Amino acid sequence: MQPTTTIIVRPWNAATLILRITIISLVIITGYAFTTFNTRGVDFWAGVDMLGSNFSALLLTPYLKNITFDVMVHNLFITIGLGFLTTIFGAAIALGLALLAAQNLAPRWLTIIIKGLTAFVRAVPTVLWVLIFAVSAGLGSVAAVLGMTFHSAGYLIKAYSESFEEIDNGTNEAHKASGANWLQIVFKAVLTSSATALLSWTFLRFEINFSTAIAMGAAAGAGGIGYDMFMASGFYLNLHEMGAFTYAVLAFAIVLEAGATRYKASLSK
Amino acid sequence: MHKLDFFTQKRLSFGLFVMVLIVLTYATIIFTEYNVAKGFTSIPKAVRWATANFYPDAAAIKKLPAILAKLSDTILMSVASATVASFFAFFVAIFGAQTTRINVWFSVFARGIATVFRNIDVSAWALILLFSFGQSSFTGYFALFFVTFGFMVRVLIETIDEVSTDSVEALRATGASYFAIITQSVIPSCLPQLVSWVLFMIETNIRSATLVGILTGTGIGYSFDIYYKSLNYNAASLVIVVIVISVSAIEAVSNWIRRAVL
Amino acid sequence: MPLLQIAQLSKRYGTDKYALEGIDFTVDTGEFVAIIGPSGAGKSTLLRCINHMIPMSSGDVVFADASTKSFNATQLRAHRTQIGMIFQHYNLVNRLSVIENVLHGRLGYKSTVAGVMGWYSNAEKQQAVEILQSLGLSEQMYKRCDQLSGGQKQRVGIARALIQNPKLLLCDEPIASLDPSAAKIIMDTLKDINQRLGITIIVNLHQVDVAMRYAQRIIGINSGKIVCDAAPDAITPTIIHEVYGSEAGELILDFGEQYAQA
């Protein structure tokens, strides 16, 4: 090889090119985004300045004023209950429909229809589903449960059906060859071999639904601790009380996350 | 007593699991005072109502430019918060990951902060930040920023420890300096994953931004809220159509980029 | 002339039992030493104590007449640049090109800024090209490392070590993940480097037959202690038994076969 004056060190290829274009685009869009922000007369630096004192009021001096501790705990459990209920309902619906959405279990036309519908359901934010149901059911826990169940089912159908599709096809073939019918295959091969995957998806969705239940309390009249937070922020303007609620919510969320982490660790052992 | 065989035992424990779930569900229904009957009857009612009223009509289409302007606000805010938060999260993750940390205590601190940030729901963040930034875009921006930051620190710590441990060891053995190891090994090995996670957070943030918008009066969430509260359901349905199209489009673009770079 | 002196080296992780205890040996310039022993005996720890990838608990490593015990960070980096290291899992940055991975071997010689930016001189690039040529990798130069076979990846690892212009090569199980023909190419390459370039080599192996065929000297380790230190022709089945304990049966079988072939 001739000694060349320039030896390229980092050759270009499609992957690096697309990576760079993506990063540059994100930076440009971000820069542009800041110029479009609607300040509504709020001074950014004054806000940042206030952030410090607000955080210390929130985190260092939390106390309850308008409700008692017992009521707060009760409302926290209402929120947890809504998250739990919608996860169970969503999982029950998803379990049935995911079998019809998995490519290795159902005819192609059926999987396409179900997957298309669930993609639509997932693309609409949960809060909008809740508000849509609220028109006929009225604002409250019924609309919240229906809307959250809807979105959970859409999410879990996708997750479950992908777990089913990952199952080794050999298992199914073997059962088919032994003369098992569709239902027998589903119960003996599919559900048993994907059980742990289904459980971890469901648990993840419970974490999401707990958060969503807070948000629905705040934005869609679903009650629970989310509503208390909404009142503390918008009506009583009490950061200290907000702090107490934040700690309550944070405590349960961290317990959930730690539980999920331990469950994952026990699986990989 | 007979010792139960493996399959019977398995069936029993599964049966017990289902029983516990049913009892828990029933208890929760009573505790939350959820009206099951009303829940079931509401579904056909909602479908009937939606087919009769919830579709975009000609008058709604005239509102499209205004809706699109709000949509672009929401998308821009989602991209900006995801990008900037991920940038900061990457630095914190480098100091927090086992492979690249300088100090054990800083690592514990970084993980702790990230846990707090991501476990306060975005709606709670918005309500908290309303105290500092009022009904401006900053409230939504920082709410999305904090949640993204907390999430990204966690996944990036995992990514760094998973992808770059081996090559970091090799570069340390050549005598390379700490910062050279970061730029020559950690960044090139983690960048594709990082970008993939940023795209994921943009998708997530667009959905969250709709919710935050209802609380703070900004973006597409605010448009929906206004049409909804003024009973202009045709325009509200158009907002939904616009959201579905844009979320699907962004998801498609992200998937294409992911396939190309990973 | 001794290049490396290990004096009473001990290593203890926390308060566990000693991983290495009272290790004492000297390696002369130009030697080809194989370290054998069962898994968990402390071979990897010993190798990593030599270039301080793992800090030792007590004792000293004297390299090129300098005690390395109390080196500061800068001295440590300079120490590591003189020692190349080769790993079982190659430890390359998989997403980068072959030549870039080779040039990583020069990072130890660079200032922080040049290292962070990845600035390499033309002479360095030229040397990288020549080393790749000598290892039969010219055609792979611009490929990404994740497109290479295991044997090719290990040769890139060797190239990265060679461009350091090292006095000593530490090889940690270099052929444990390779098929027999690729393993032979790697061992022949190491032998060639030892003889042609006069670079001292210490290699951890778990295959006794390979150690016997390539090394001038074999050090056997069990439970963190040296059990034997001798030329290959002085190694008997009894000694192997002492090194490997209960695992030895199978190995002695290999050992017999090798003699039958010879």
Image (cartoon, rainbow, N blue to C red):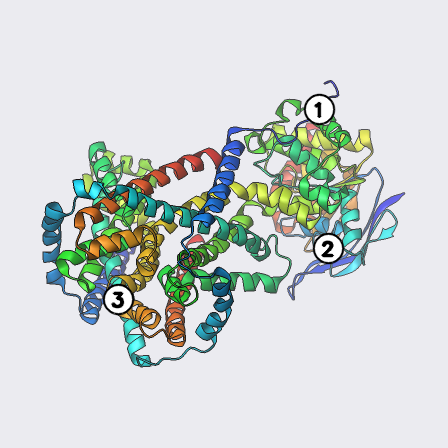
- Name the residue at 67% across, 49% down: B179
What's the residue type where badge 3 is placed?
Gly
Front residue of A156/B12: it is A156
Q: Quadrant of residue B124?
A: bottom left
Amino acid type for the residue under numbered disc 1:
Gln
- Quarter of the picture holding the C terminus of chain A: bottom left
Circle nearer the N terminus (2, 1): 1
**For residue A56, which numbered disc appears in the image?**
none
Near-viewer residue (B162 or A51): A51
Q: Are marks 2 and 1 in contact (CB under 8 Å)?
A: no
Residue that badge 1 annotates: C133
Query: Disc 2 residue type?
Result: Lys
Tag 3 and tag 2, C-beta contact below 8 Å? no
Q: Position of residue B23 (x, y in %)?
A: 21, 66
- Determine which quarter of the picture holds residue A167: top left
State whether residue A165 is above or below residue B212: above
Q: Of helix, strand and loop, which one carries label 2?
A: strand
Q: Identify whether C91 is placed above or below B4.
A: above
Locate the N terminus of chain A and report the quarter of the image it occupies: top right
Marks 3 & 1, CB-CB < 8 Å contact: no
Q: Residues within 10 Å of mark 2 (few under 14, many from 20)?
A: many
Mark 3–mark 1 distance (CA, rounded to whole Å): 67 Å
Which residue lies at the image location 40% right of the left edge and 54% below the top edge?
A: A38
**Label 3 crowd (10 A; few <14 / some 14-19 / many >=20):** many
Would you name the residue on which mark 3 appears?
Answer: A81
The residue wearing badge 2 is C225
